[in-house]
């Protein structure tokens, strides 16, 4: 388990917390804390692609229940509330903001709306709430810079699975080269093992 393998605070993507009903979903929060997590998320994506987003009232009740569970923990626990409509077919930014505002009122520590793409959208969301906002670059304009996001008052930036997807894409490119051309030019682009090992060692330090 990652949380047990590091002394650094670790946040967990708990998705919909494994249940639809607020009280059932909230039971995952103390379990996450017991596993060593210092924070976790609860999202309004149901997991059902045919009916992807919980209704407004239920979504807010779920966040409130998770907040109440976090308050009972023996250690601080940062709860992030997701409004996920923008990556499940909606283009209604106002509806997303309304949910984030309600999640803030319910007590969430961090607010997160995957699917924000432009700097203007990000600024609009940040200016509409008082809690820290997370932006995930998986869905955002890739030309945005850390400086721009900082100026927009974004407090947390994540890349989702983009790092692993980048590595897998490189692997697939090498596989295609061998299969389609019988060549191995990718080998010459590899960093030396020592450089990679030193990089991992510095990351652990």
Image: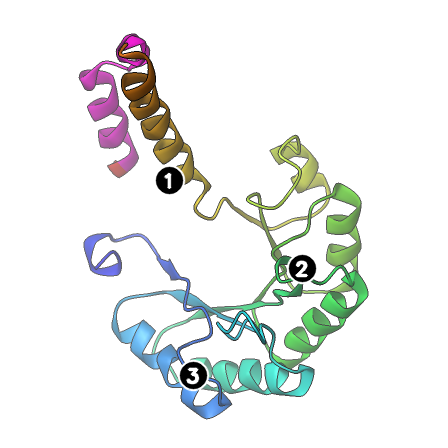
**Does label 2 or label 1 sit earlier along the sequence?**
2
Q: Magenta region: which residues?
A: 184-203
Of helix, strand and loop, which one carries label 2?
Answer: helix
Q: Can you identify the residue that label 3 sits on?
A: 19
**Does label 3 or label 2 sit earlier along the sequence?**
3
Q: Can you identify the residue that label 2 sits on?
A: 86
Residue drawn at the location 29% of the way across and 25% of the way down? 175
**Does label 1 or label 3 sit earlier along the sequence?**
3
Q: Report the Cα–Cα distance between label 2 and label 1.
A: 23 Å
Where's residue 114, x and y in %? 60, 56
Q: Can you identify the residue that label 1 sits on?
A: 164
* Residue 132 falls inside the magenta stretch: no
Residue drawn at the location 35% of the way across and 57% of the way down? 10
- Identify whether 31 is placed above or below 9: below
Q: Is residue 77 left or right of residue 177?
A: right
Where's residue 86, x and y in %? 67, 59
Residue drawn at the location 54% of the way across and 84% of the way down? 62
Predominant SS along the magenta part:
helix
Of helix, strand and loop, which one carries label 3?
Answer: loop
């Amino acid at each position: 388990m990652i949380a047990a393998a590091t002394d650094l605070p670790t946040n967990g993507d708990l998705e919909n917390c494994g249940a639809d009903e607020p009280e059932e979903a909230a039971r995952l929060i103390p379990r996450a804390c017991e596993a060593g997590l210092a924070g976790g998320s609860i999202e309004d994506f149901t997991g059902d692609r045919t009916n992807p987003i919980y209704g407004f009232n239920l979504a807010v009740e779920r966040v409130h229940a998770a907040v109440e569970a976090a308050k009972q923990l023996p250690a601080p626990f940062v709860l992030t509330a997701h409004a996920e409509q923008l990556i499940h077919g909606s283009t209604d930014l106002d509806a997303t903001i309304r949910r984030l505002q309600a999640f803030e009122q319910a007590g969430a520590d961090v607010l997160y709306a995957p699917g924000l793409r432009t700097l203007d959208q990000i600024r609009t969301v940040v200016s509409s709430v008082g809690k820290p906002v997370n932006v995930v670059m998986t869905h955002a304009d890739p030309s945005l810079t850390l400086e721009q996001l900082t100026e927009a008052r974004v407090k947390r930036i994540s890349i989702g699975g983009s790092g692993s997807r980048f590595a897998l894409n490189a692997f697939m490119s090498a596989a295609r080269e061998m299969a389609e051309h019988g060549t191995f030019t990718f080998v010459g682009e590899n960093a030396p093992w020592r450089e990679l090992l030193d990089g991992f060692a510095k990351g652990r330090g």
